[in-house]
Structure formats: structure tokens, C-alpha cells
Image: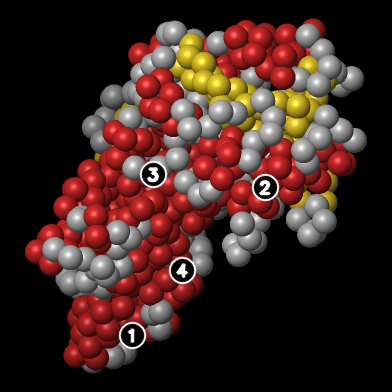
Amino acid sequence: MFEQAEDHSLADEASDALTSLVHVLYAVALDPGRLGDFVAAWEAVLAVLPPGALPLRHPDFERHLRRARRFLDRLPAAAAPPSTAPELCGVLRVPAFLSDGIMRISACNRAAGSAFGIAPGAPLAALPFEAADVVTLSSTIRMVARRAQRPTNLRLRSSITGAPVILRVCPIDRHDARPQAMVISTDPVWPEDFGALLQETFGLTPAEVEIVRGLTLGLPIRDIAELRGRAVDTVRTQMRSIQSKTETHSQPELLRLVLGLMDIALHEGARATAGSPAGRALDPLPMRSLVLPDGRRMEWTEFGDPAGAPILHLHGDFGLARWLPAAERAARLRGLRVVVPVRAGYGRSHPLPETSDLTQGTALDLVALVDQLGISRCAVLALGADLRFALTLSGLRPRLVSGILGCALDLPPTGAECDASRDRWSRLLAGTGRASPEALGFLVQAAAVQARLRGKESALRLMFGASPADAAALRGAELRATLIAGTDICIGPGGSAHEAFTRSRLDAGQGWAGLLRQARVPVRLLHGEEDPVAPPQAVARFAAPFPALRPGTLPGAGRLLVLSDWQEVLDRLIPLSAR
């Protein structure tokens, strides 16, 4: 049940909804592409939660959330390499490869590499079959690929194990019109260390793992018992233990769960090899690092005029660390040295200790960086809720900060007025953070994994495309490429900053009023007229009690104004800089 719930009927309704949500939770953990199913179901839970039930306390659901996040942790760090044939992308559990049957294997999945010891470019002779069988297979591939023969099953014998192997040869349609066939084995592969994964995740014994393995091979309980030299009743008792530990209620449900985990294990090891689409437009910027006083590492990069007036660019929760190429060139021509600190937990910057104050700790990291760089006076450009870090920095070092420009403000998530102004994504993050930090962590992590595996472009459109102005801006190839490259410190080949993002969202509403009342430097706000998260009227009402805040509105702009309207941003930033 929920603590603090005053309306027990609503609390019971929400509890029932949470129970039904568990299956969706695991479905998303195994396939982040189903995140939309979780979002819809979770929004239904939030809709029936009474205000007095927040934050909710439901130990069973929180335990499932933690377990589902461990599943997400095992998904690959990046999408499959672009050289992987699209025909093989959906074939995970069984060995499969492509060939024209003449010379070589043009592509293969990871299961084929594991089962047959092959790699793209290997000759057909490398397959672990007798020479006569390889000749038969080669001839069949050629005939099927040219549609001179219908899809065919072949029964060959492994030269490694001596066991029979059934191969299915079927034609494929290639964009380059080269005749090729796909060869699929009917035997699923048990991934390396998969037994250890089952033991670690569910606490299964080695004997129980072997029973699960038999199930994945399609063996009935009687055959598994015979192979293991055990009585059928003993194996059935072990099956009940397995289902209890995995919290499944039937053999098919257990099999679906295990096969989903098998997909994760077969995905592991994939690495992105393609460069950023923005690489041709943006000058490469090396990441630099320093060791902070507490021993953590902090990264930063910079562009513009190395001898120019310093600007600290705080990249916001989404990690927007780059400007458009023209804007970066303009910064150099206008005498600005733009330093981009990579916040703790982003990129390869070490996270802050969990017990530390995020706002204070981030500001102290900035102090260490400006001291390292010998910067005694600078302006700060802060995106979103990073305004609180800029304000804290100005309080710690009153003589350091000459002025602050906050762009695309994230309104502190306190009160219905702010929530009513948010787009669906921001409203979901704010509502989830209030209801369940564990659920927020899962939601953000699943979104990050989905973006890594399926490409960031669709995720960025979801995050930034809620207004017509931003949707139009995202149609520009250069802006889109800059956004993709600039957010690599948040979601990129090196991993994701979902933990730091979640922590920042949970902390974002803390201490704003005190920071703003204490501000002793010029603070300017710049927001788009079409900003769905912080509309002009809401920003004006938010800023009214604080004399230090001066909001400004850009007609026809949205959340992406720092990219789409960079000239205006520079024009407002330069008067705040220490020249």
C-alpha cells in the first residue's frame, strides 16, 4: 500500500495498476523500443494517484524497477555497427549468415560467430562442416539466391561435435540486386556466460540453469529429466523453484523471459563504429581533463578565441555542448573564449558522491576548473535548470561572474501553474520524479538505451520537437547534426548520463528562491515565444518576485534557441562578458 494515502479506494486502484504494470516493465527492459507502452501505463497510474499519496511507497514495485534496470544495464553501449546487414538485425538467438554461395560469407550475426567460428569475409570453407557438405551448401545457396530453387532445408553434420545441424536456405532481396541467400540454423545458441547471468539475476542454482537451457532447446520435461539422470518429479519440483525465483507463472512465460534475456546477452559486445554525422560540419574539439581536489576527474572542452573574454557554457541536462559551426566561428571572431565544463556524471567526468549536495558540488567543480584555467572573470551561459549552478557559482566567487544569461529556462517543478505549462515529456518527468524516484530512474535509463540502440535523432525530436519553431529548426540538417554531436556527452558511444540526468531532475526544484534572492550579478533570461516547457507568461510570473531577473522573449523561437537563434544569444551574452 501507499504511505500517506488518504483516499484508500484511489490508493487500491493505483496499487492494482502498479501490479499490472510489472509485465510492461520487463517488456521494456528486454526491448526498450516498447518504452511507449510503459509511458502510457505509467501515466494511467499517475492519473489515479491522490496528492496525499506522493511520493508513493510500494516495495514490490520498486524491487521490480531495480531488477528491470539491471537488465537495461546489460544492453549494449551502442547500436550495432552500420556494417551489419539489415536482414540480420532481427535474427539474434539462432546462427544466421549471408552469402552468394560462390566465395565468402558477406555478413553474419553474433550467434553464427559463436556457433560456427566465422566472421564477415570468411570463406564458406571456414564453416565447421565436412568438405562435401560445404560443397552441397554452396551449390544450394547459389541456386536459391538466383530463385532457381525454392527455399530449402539441409541436414549437415558438424565437424566439431558430430551432431546433425539443420540449415534453412532462403533468398533475400538486396538493394544492390546481387543474388544472395540467408542461411539460418534451427538450433538456438546458448550465449557465453548466459548461465552466470541467470544465476546472478535470479539466484538460480547450476542444476536449475541446465533445466532452463533444456527448455530453450525445446526439450520436454521428460527428456530433460532423462538427460540429467533425474526423476521427472524431481525436475518438476525444480521447475516450480525456477518459476518462483523468476516470478513467472507458466512455462511459456518463463521461456519468453529467458529468450528475451538471451537477446540481451547476444547483443552484448556490439559497438558503434560510425562517426558522428556532424563530424564533417563541426571542427573536432579535444576533451581535456583535470583531477579535482577530491580525486575525481572532470572533463572540459573549449572553442572560440583562446585569448578572448571567457564564457562558461553550462550544457544543461541534455548535454548540449556544441554550437553551430557558424556560431563557433563567430565566437572566435568576436573575441570570446567559450569553455564547456562537462558536468559530473556526463561524458567521462566522474559523478559526485551520492551523499553530496548536487548544486553545491557542481559549483565547486566549476570553481576548480576556472582556477585550473586561470580565469578570474567570466560570464556564464546556462541552459535549462543549469541556471542554479551559475547562481551558486556567483555566490561562491562574487568577483568571478560578470553576468549570467539563462536560456530556455526549466521552471522549478513546484506547483500546478508550472506543470500546466509543460509539454508531455517534461510533465511526465516532473510527475514521475514526485511520485517515484525509482520509476524516474527507470524511465530515463530506458529512454537513453532506446536512443543508443535506435539512434538519437528520434529521441531528440521527442525531447525538442514539441513546438512548431523547434520542429522547423530540426529540419535543418546542420542544426540536427550539431545537436546529435553536442549531446554525445549525455547519450553517446561512451555510454549515457542517465544517472546524472535523473539526479539533476530530482534536485532541480531545490533552493531556487534563495539563490535568486541572493543574486548580486546581472541575470538575464532568454526564452522562445513558442517554448512549450516555459512559455513567456509562466516565465514572467516566475521572475516577477526577483528584481535580479530580467526575462526576454524571442518571437518564433522554441527550446532550441541557443542553436536556431545563436546571433541573438551572442548579442545578449557579449554585454555580460568581462572585456
Residue 574: name its quadrant: top right
Q: Earlier in the sequence, mark 4 or mark 1?
A: 4
Residue at (39%, 65%) from the top-left corner? 67
Q: Nearer the viewer, residue 127 or 558?
A: 558
- Mark 4 and mark 1 residues within 8 Å of each other at the beta carbon: no
Q: Which residue is mark 1?
A: 228
Q: Please state if 503 lies on the left or on the right of 155 as rendered.
A: right
Tell me the kind of residue under disc 2: Thr
Instruction: Kindly report the distance in space between the C-alpha atoms of the residues bearing marks 3 and 4.
Output: 42 Å
Tell me the kind of residue under disc 1: Arg
Residue at (62%, 26%) from the top-left corner? 523
Instruction: Kindly report the distance in space between the C-alpha atoms of the residues bearing marks 3 and 1.
Output: 61 Å
Residue at (36%, 53%) from the top-left corner? 434
**Total residue callouts:** 4
Q: Secondary structure at mark 3?
A: loop
Q: Earlier in the sequence, mark 2 or mark 3?
A: 2
Q: Secondary structure at mark 2?
A: helix
Q: Secondary structure at mark 1?
A: helix
Q: Residues within 10 Å of mark 3 (few under 14, many from 20)?
A: few
Q: Which residue is mark 2?
A: 362
Tell me the mark number nearer the camera, choosing from 2 and 1.
2
The x, y position of residue 94, in whole percent, is 37, 52
Q: Which residue is mark 4?
A: 197
Tell me the kind of residue under disc 3: Thr
In the image, is residue 144 above or below residue 238? above
Q: Which residue is mark 3?
A: 414
The x, y position of residue 296, in whole percent, is 76, 55
Residue 146: name its quadrant: top left
